[in-house]
Image (tube, rainbow, N blue to C red):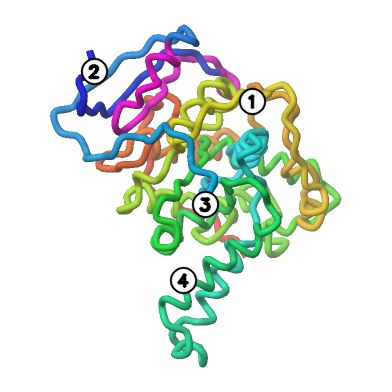
Amino acid sequence: MIVAGQSCSLIQLSSAVCRPSLVSDCTFKWRGSFPKKFPELAKETGLRFRLCFCSTVLEKSTVNTMPVPHSEREFHFISGLPRSGSTLTAALLRQNPRFSAGMSSPVAGLFEGVISQVSAGSEISTMVDPDQRARILRGLFDSYYADRDQPVIFDTSRSWTAQLSALMKLFPDAKLICTVRNVAWVMDSLERQFRNNAFENTRLFNNPGERSTVYTRVEALAGANRLVGYPWHALREACYSEFAERLVLVDYDLLTARPADVLQLLYEFLGEEPFEHDFENVQYDAPEFDAQLGLDGLHRVHKTVQPRPRETILPPDLFQRYSQLSFWHDLPHSAAYRIVAQAPTDQQQHTMPEPKQTVQ
């Protein structure tokens, strides 16, 4: 029995999920106050669930399940790791006529550029006070999305998890959907993209030394300021920040295997009314953007949402090194919400692997 005011720290929904190359048990994990609609969800889907109560839990406000008023535009954000379902998540959300969502927008880059221009060391820094800076930064969002009719906007960028302090000042009610995936499979996906565009020198790598072998390519991408390493570090920082309760981490494997259940949990997190999505007819592509990166198909979403098991193309030692970086399976002292697969039995690392060879 659920008593009013009682909080639970973990809800587990027993199910099965297809991970790459295997099928095994998985667990939905949900931290925070007990969402009222979970019994209905379990009844509708036939899932089993159990509640694990803790004697001490973080104080959290109950997730609002009332529809968001249309009188004011709301901003939320999509972030997380590359090749982990952020574009798929946006493609699904945009099926809802209330939502505007898409691939990474230029707003984050403009955002960082404005802060740089008005910060100490700039000749105009003394001319723009903090209130003016906030209005200018908020104006970027209002101007960029001025032609959108939807009342709820999702802006996507892997850098938003590194900008939480500024975002929360501008949008105190905003929430972040952060997609995650086993880092070894992220690297595998990027390596496949590289090999599929064999006649292109993709802009993912800075010089011939970085792109020379699979080892140099993976280690370059894992750099602290590079495509995989940067969002991995930024996400870990966000999970332990004072704004962690604004985050929900979404496992790519669960999203593709159980899209309806994952989306229903996301709607609970966002405080939005449920919407019936079409998982057999998902559309998204950005051929012009992908072409200028030299990676055709990078943002192309499959029409049907389903697991696509495959064998990795990474060497076994490389795959093993990067498969131990899924820190989101175990987040002690973090207030972040999680919809993730059951934790692996092997020990997870808390830092990116050190390079095995020098990248010239």
Q: Is residue 252 magenta?
A: no
- Asked if the residues shown at circle 1 and circle 3 are in contact, with their CB atoms under 8 angstroms apart, the answer is no
Residue of label 3: 72
Q: Is residue 37 above or below residue 297?
A: above
Q: Residue at the location (63% across, 46% down)?
A: 150
Left or right of 141, for residue 14: left
Residue 331, x across and y down, in percent: 32, 39
Residue of label 2: 2
Q: Which residues are magenta?
A: 18-42
Residue of label 1: 277
The local secondary structure at tag 3 comes to loop
Residue 321 visible in the picture: no
Gap between marks 4 and 2, in whole Å?
42 Å
Quarter the N terminus occupies: top left
Q: Is residue 275 above or below residue 205?
A: above
Q: Residue at the location (53% across, 73% down)?
A: 136
Q: Label 1 amino acid?
A: His
The local secondary structure at tag 4 comes to helix
